Image (cartoon, coloured by chain):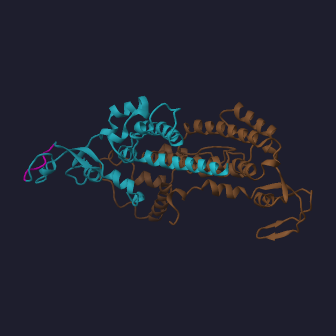
Chain colours: A cyan, B brown
Amino acid sequence: MPSRYYDIDDFIADGQKIPCIFQTAVPEMGYLEHGRSESTDIRHGARLELPLWLAEPLAMGVSDEFPNGLVMVSTPAPFTSKIINALKANAVNVDLRSLTMYFFRLAQRWLELTGDHTLLAQISAAFKERAVVVNDYAYNTRSTSLMTDSSEFMGKLDDTEVKLYKAAHVASRQFKKWVSIKK
Amino acid sequence: MALPPKQIGTFLPSEISFLAENTKVTIIPRQALDSVDLIGLKLPSMRPMRRVEVPLWVAIILKKQSRCNIVSPAWLSEDNLKKAYEAEASNMTRFSDKLPWEWIEVGELVLESAPDDLSSAPHVIRNLLRDIREIRQAKVRAGLRGLEYTYMQLDHIGAMELNEIRPFVTMTMNELRILQNSVENEEEQAAEGMLPDDVDDGSDMDDTFETREYSAPPRNSSHFDDSVGSRLSRPPAPSYDDDGEDDDDELEMDESYLHTINR
C-alpha cells in the first residue's frame, strides 16, 4: 500500500489474520495447519487463518491456472453479520477490543478489498456513535453524570478510539489547567 | 520534530491566550506617555484621562503599574453578556454572533488583570461567562453527533473553543475520511465536485478559515480508485505497474497522512 507506507498502524492492521479457504493443495506446508506434522500438505479446501498481507496477494488471480486466486477469503470475525448487527443495535456496548485491537484499521483494509458500501455506512455510523461517547468520557473523567464506570467502557475501545480518547482528554485537561491558573 | 506530539497541529491554551493579547482595548491612562515605536506597532502618545486604543498586553502591563484603567469591552458588560446568554439559549443549533472570536481569553485576561474596571461585580461577569461557555459546550457536543468526513461548519465559535475540540474533530473526521476513501467510487468523485466551496458569507475571516480547514475533500481519490479499489471483486489479475507515474502524488499523500496521524 504505497500511500500509507510509513504508517505503523496500517502495518499492524496488515498483520491481522483473516480466514481463508485454500483452492489448491500446497505441498509440504501442512504444518501451518494446527496440529499437523511438517511433511504433510495443505489440502484443497483447508481453512486457515492467514495474515492480511499474505491473504491479499494469494486471493488475487496470479496465473491462468488459478484465475480466482490460490485462496478464497471469507469474512473476518469482526465483520460478520452478528457483530455488525450488534453495532447497529447499540454501537457503544460492543466490545471491539476483544474482537481485534485494530478494528477500524482492519475495517479500512477490508473495505478496500470488498468495496462494500453497506458495510461502510454501518461501520462509519458505529464509529461516529462511539466517538461521541469517547469524547464525553474524555471530558468527564471523574464524572458521575454518565452513571457508568469509565474503565468499563474504555476496555471496549479499539486502538483508534484509544488515540482519539487521549487526544480529546489532553485538550480538555490543558484547557482546565489554563483556566485554573487564571483564577 | 522537536515539539512533543500533543503540541503538533494544535495550540496550547496559553498560546491561544497569548495570541489574544494582541486584541485592541481602550484604556484611560493616568499618566502621560510619549508615543513609542515598537516593531510592527506604534503606541499612541498618552495623556491622562484621554482614551486611547492599545493592544491588551500593553493595557495589562500599564494596569499592573497602576498607570491606566482598562475600559472593559462593550460585550463584556453584564447586560450584553445576559443578552448573549439569551441569544445562545434561544437557538440551540447555532452559536450567537454577540461574542468576539477571542471571548474566552479576553474575558479571562480582563477579569484577571482589571477586575476593578468592570462595570459589574467580577463574580457576576465570571458566572455569566461560565454559563455561556457551558451552553455553548452543550451545542458543540450536540454538533459532534452530526460529524461528517467532508466539512464542518461552526460559525461564531471562539478560538479557545475551537482549539479545544480540534484534536478530537480532526481525528474523527480523518478516520471517517479514511474509511470512506477505502470504498471510493464514481458517485463519490461526482459528489466531490459539488462540495460547497463557499458555505459562509465570507464576512468573517475566522469562519471562512475554519470551513476551509475542515472541508478538505478526499484527496487523491482518482489514484485510490484505480490502484486500490475493489481488487478482490475483479477476477482478472490487477496490474501492479500502474503506480509508476504518480509517485509525487503518493509522497504528498504520505506526508499529509502522517501529519494528521501525529495529531
Q: Can you give x and y, in whole percent of width and height, for residue A52 in the image? A: 29, 50
Q: Which residues are magenta?
A: A39-44
Instruction: Decide if residue B211 is in sight here.
Output: no
Left or right position of A63 against B29: left
Q: Is residue B128 above or below residue B28?
A: above
Residue situated in front as seen by the camera: B140 or A51? B140
Give the residue drawn at x 37%, y 48%: A109
Which secondary structure type mostly characterizes the magenta part of the structure? loop
Q: Can you give x and y, in whole percent of width and height, for residue A114 in the image? A: 35, 43
Q: Is residue B36 magenta?
A: no
Q: Can you give x and y, in whole percent of width and height, for residue A170 in the image? A: 53, 50
Q: Is residue A140 above or below residue B216?
A: above
Residue B143 position by quadrant? top right
Left or right position of B69 against A159: right
Query: Across the whole image, how many numbered discs are drawn on residues?
Result: 0
Q: Can you give x and y, in whole percent of width and height, for residue A10 in the image? A: 38, 53
Q: Is residue A40 magenta?
A: yes
Left or right position of B161 against B77: left
In the picture as drawn, the residue positioned furthest to the top comes out as A89
Q: Is residue B7 above or below residue A131?
A: below
Residue B157 position by quadrant? top right
